Image (cartoon, coloured by chain):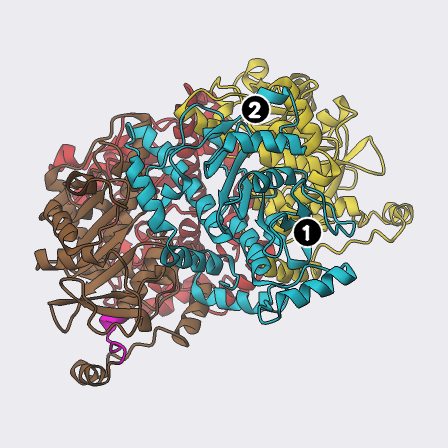
Chain colours: A brown, B red, C cyan, D yellow
Amino acid sequence: MKPIEDVSRRKLLIAGSALIGCAAMPARLVRAQSASRGAALPELVEFERLVAANRILANEDVVDAFGHVSIRDPRDPERFVMSRSRSPAFVEHDDLMEFDLEGNAIDGRGRRPYGERMIHAAVYAARADVNSVVHHHAYGVLPFTITDAPLTPVVHTASVIGSEIPVWDIRDSYGDTDMLVRTIEQGRNLAAALGDNTCLLMRGHGAVVTAENIKRAVLTSVYLQVNADILLRAEEIGRPVPLSAGEISRSAETQFSPLAVDRTWEYFCLRAGVDPV
Amino acid sequence: MKPIEDVSRRKLLIAGSALIGCAAMPARLVRAQSASRGAALPELVEFERLVAANRILANEDVVDAFGHVSIRDPRDPERFVMSRSRSPAFVEHDDLMEFDLEGNAIDGRGRRPYGERMIHAAVYAARADVNSVVHHHAYGVLPFTITDAPLTPVVHTASVIGSEIPVWDIRDSYGDTDMLVRTIEQGRNLAAALGDNTCLLMRGHGAVVTAENIKRAVLTSVYLQVNADILLRAEEIGRPVPLSAGEISRSAETQFSPLAVDRTWEYFCLRAGVDPV
Amino acid sequence: MKPIEDVSRRKLLIAGSALIGCAAMPARLVRAQSASRGAALPELVEFERLVAANRILANEDVVDAFGHVSIRDPRDPERFVMSRSRSPAFVEHDDLMEFDLEGNAIDGRGRRPYGERMIHAAVYAARADVNSVVHHHAYGVLPFTITDAPLTPVVHTASVIGSEIPVWDIRDSYGDTDMLVRTIEQGRNLAAALGDNTCLLMRGHGAVVTAENIKRAVLTSVYLQVNADILLRAEEIGRPVPLSAGEISRSAETQFSPLAVDRTWEYFCLRAGVDPV
Amino acid sequence: MKPIEDVSRRKLLIAGSALIGCAAMPARLVRAQSASRGAALPELVEFERLVAANRILANEDVVDAFGHVSIRDPRDPERFVMSRSRSPAFVEHDDLMEFDLEGNAIDGRGRRPYGERMIHAAVYAARADVNSVVHHHAYGVLPFTITDAPLTPVVHTASVIGSEIPVWDIRDSYGDTDMLVRTIEQGRNLAAALGDNTCLLMRGHGAVVTAENIKRAVLTSVYLQVNADILLRAEEIGRPVPLSAGEISRSAETQFSPLAVDRTWEYFCLRAGVDPV
């Protein structure tokens, strides 16, 4: 935990460089401008949050050099937005790119997209209820992708990960690959395995986390890792008692209440040195 | 461990914002003022310590976005004081709220209280010897809430956690819930399970730590986690030898001596960047 | 993760002291100067990267007070370059020394070389495809040097460590020693055990990592440790599924693509506070 | 790992407060002054190193609020020097106190000594070869104090801990106590159990580390913990192979060579933000 006064200093520095919101500017006007000139995405608060989410996920050790987070475009549900290929720790507003639901860049301007954007494209296409997706390789979660020990929620803060977390193995449908989800077809295969669940594990690779909004996606990603750590440690001393189905659904509702989501978002933002927008 | 000169810098910064004590001002006078105007709580040293305790518990990874610490009001034993609903890392004096022993806010001024303040209310009502309560979800402790491995003190610095730590399961009396202690009735049920012990574990949720004063409560919370980590690791290599009952009581007396409490408090405060008041 | 603005501050500081590149200066000219005067090595970008690699490996906890990294001299394949005997965290350009492939210093200027430079000398002599070597004692890797549990790649980012990692025991050929590789003969013995593999473990001591270039050597060293941590944790909850041979080779190709190597290099450099050259 | 430029800043700050050496001043003269006036200890380089050792042990997580380090007085072998009762992270020159070999303060000036100074007194009395003693509760070491798993050196950097590490249980001779070594008699009992070994574990309490000089004592304390961590993790995946007796003695000789000790000392000092004197 960094002390609060360091956070203040950081906020100033960041405010001076990357995270200046412009929510006051009408989104439609901004959009028209950018469309007519092929310019960067407008500075909507949703995009500011997307930049913040990148920094948070890096700061909480959910992502390292790899991993990415996206949102469904608030201006067009048939599109989504994520950074160009870059480590999340360093993502800035100008790195953001827009894609259609088959993973094609709308206005690439020569920037290199993430190779695995198809995960996001396919999930947004399959799940109208999902507006944010995280793909990561959190080290605490990875042991559960390579063993048959189920990653069940055992603490109430992690109830948001849901009662079922399927494990998808790319080898089952595609044989030996480089393990990456490179085509929209592979993305759809993954999305089918995800079904109506919130999270999915990828064997020997990582996880996919989905949510109704980006704050929930970040919260769920962090506590997926927390739960994995606690469960693994509990396995060393006994037979862990999981939450019941009723506890999971009721507790998830509480954890996703505005009160809990806002408190968590403020916490994650200040720790990462970004403004809690 | 942060180096000592960083700490000095932090102290200055904090002194300029939140932690200015005013122990020289007569408490009764201050209280009359605040009572007549419905203003914030007076700046007593006890409240300054409560703010410091919030920062320490965050800095030592006992709490994250969630968890809270309270004290019995030094001016009125039928009341207690804790922050409004906020991550402990960021609590300041103005966040403090006063409650009666049924959990009702005395002077809420529109601030949102913690949902689980009933834990504190019920413990203060049941235990006249308790003047500070911590509720937390320390990750190192949580494995012991979901297995039947007893969390026994195995190192002398952790003797303060006491020889018996009951595990309370909200499901036993209330069936499927969102796992939170939301009513004073549930709080009393928990307090009954706590009995005369110092600590209590809550299945799939966290822990409650009680103490005669806030310094002891912080000390006990930190070493509860230290003991849990050491015990869990010891289980991996053999059969751990616990402290005997006599060792626990004698060692706890030493750990709670002014010498040890003050040394620990200075240590925790300087690490967290707050003035050791 | 340090926040990005801290990184900027550090870059400035370092630019003012140690890491000023001079890639614009013709290497041949610089070399002639240094050869005629017995001066320090020229400031080639390759040497700047070598200094950066030292800092990165320290920052990522791959090395501590001990461990070292070298490159084959870009100006002469029969020589290699590494720091004088110093903890990698503090290495600067002027610490760099040049050696022939039997480990003799070319222009020592009284500086003390690493005792184990023979590891590097022998590997460069035996493996024309290797242009960078890391020797380290990463704590996460060491358990696999003293048990017969094979260190197999189980996650795709670690595919670069290769499918076979031999364990070399100095005792097999040399009986009781101080465990260090002190002679070129011992280095050759180690290099023979390495064979065509990328990594080698040394019983009760550490590891050797080889690569075609320094960026790959750093990437492989970091993910060797990540894989070891994940594999060890997976062993606690089940029977880990390894990557298949086909997955290892295809995934390693992807991880060693310029896109992935550059993203990782930027990430490691900024975290360590050095310019991503 | 903190980056090197931060270290420079820290050194300046510390130079301005606590760690100004005065090796140029004749020790005998300084001593006469302090003896005649009952003033603080002179600013010998040995005392400067003792202050540095306190900071290092805190920075490397060997000690927390508790634990202490001492040296035999370089001016009088029948005396030893350690801080007054204070967390090692904050020790400054003026905290240093001198004791005779029965633990009596020479010039206390009202300062409170550590309760467990008898450990140091008795070890110096029993072991003429020992000039520095560390007592600590390093969390990684504690599991080995409460199980019968032997803490054997398994990696060469930890060979300095020695082949035999006895476990002393205060209960064997003194029944139920507060676990602290409070009397010189108890200290002698512990020293007898230590015998000619370098380290000793205290059941449910901590460890004692001895060395010929303070740099070696710090090095040994750190690697005792490193070895404990690695050994414990190795136990999870197999049956660890220990170093042989010959490897331990030869490797310890290398680790205690001036080259290795100085490199390690520089490393620990710069990480802790103190001048490597």
Q: Which residue is mark 2?
A: D202
Disc 1: host chain: C
Disc 2: host chain: D
Percent of width and height locating residue C133:
54, 44
Percent of width and height locating residue D266:
67, 47
- A40 is within the stretch colored magenta: yes
Q: Same subunit under labels 2 and 1?
A: no
In the image, the segment drawn in magenta is: A39-47
Q: Nearer the viewer, residue C34 or B133?
A: C34
Percent of width and height locating residue B141:
35, 37
- Three-letter amino acid code of the residue under disc 2: Met
Whether B144 is drawn above or below A3: the answer is: above
Q: Is residue B142 left or right of residue B272?
A: left
Mark carried by residue C97: 1
Mark carried by residue C206: none
Quadrant housing residue C26: bottom right
Q: Is residue C133 left or right of residue A198?
A: right
* Circle 1 SS class: strand
Quick one: label 2, few (<14), some, or many (20+) residues within 10 Å? Answer: many
